[in-house]
Amino acid sequence: MDHHQHDKQNKSEQAAGAGDWRKEEKHHKHMEQLAQLGAAAARAYAMHEKHKAKKDPKHTRSHRIKEEIAATIAAGSAGFTIHEHHKRKEAKKHGHHHHH
């Protein structure tokens, strides 16, 4: 592709990109919701393993390890939820800034 065509393509991509902030905002919202779901599932599994540890004294150590792993995953998912929330706010702010 020659330089002139490349410039034309960049300008048309920029014009089309003006509405992409909505798409990006929706993407981050979706990822935030998935992260929340993952955090909730990991918390539930951690609680399940904690209960199993009490009910199954023979395998307490194994259940405690699984509980700790699930709790760590829940914390990581919660952190990712916060990250995606901020990314969504940035995309929204960026879109409103260019829209007005």
Image (cartoon, helix red, strand yellow):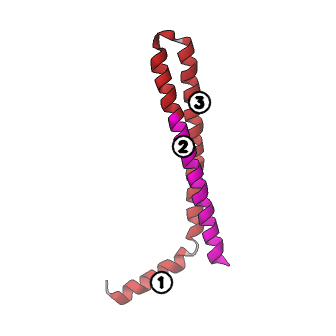
The quarter of the picture where the C terminus appears is bottom right
Whether residue 48 appears in magenta in the rendering, the answer is: no
Are discs 2 and 1 less than 8 Å apart at CB? Answer: no
Q: Give the residue type at disc 2.
A: Ser
Label 2 residue SS:
helix
Q: Is residue 7 above or below residue 71?
A: below
Q: Is residue 26 visible?
A: no
Q: Which residue is mark 1?
A: 11
Q: Is residue 13 visible?
A: yes
| Residue under the image location 53 percent in, 22 percent down | 49
Where does residue 93 sit, x and y in percent of width and height? Answer: 64, 68
Q: Which residues are magenta?
A: 72-100
27, 98: nearer the viewer: 98
| Residue under the image location 49 percent in, 20 percent down | 63
Of badges 3 and 2, the one in the foreground is 2
Badge 1 or badge 3: first in the primary sequence: 1
Q: Is residue 89 above or below residue 51?
A: below
Q: Predominant secondary structure in magenta?
A: helix
Q: Which residue is mark 2?
A: 77
Whether residue 80 appears in magenta in the rendering, the answer is: yes
| Residue under the image location 48 percent in, 78 percent down | 13
Of badges 2 and 1, the one in the foreground is 2
95, 8: nearer the viewer: 95
Residue found at the very far top of the displayed protein: 58
Report the disc number at residue 44. 3
CA–CA distance between discs 1 and 3?
49 Å
Where does residue 1 sit, x and y in percent of width and height? Answer: 31, 83
Badge 3 or badge 2: first in the primary sequence: 3
Q: Residues within 10 Å of mark 3 (few under 14, many from 20)?
A: some
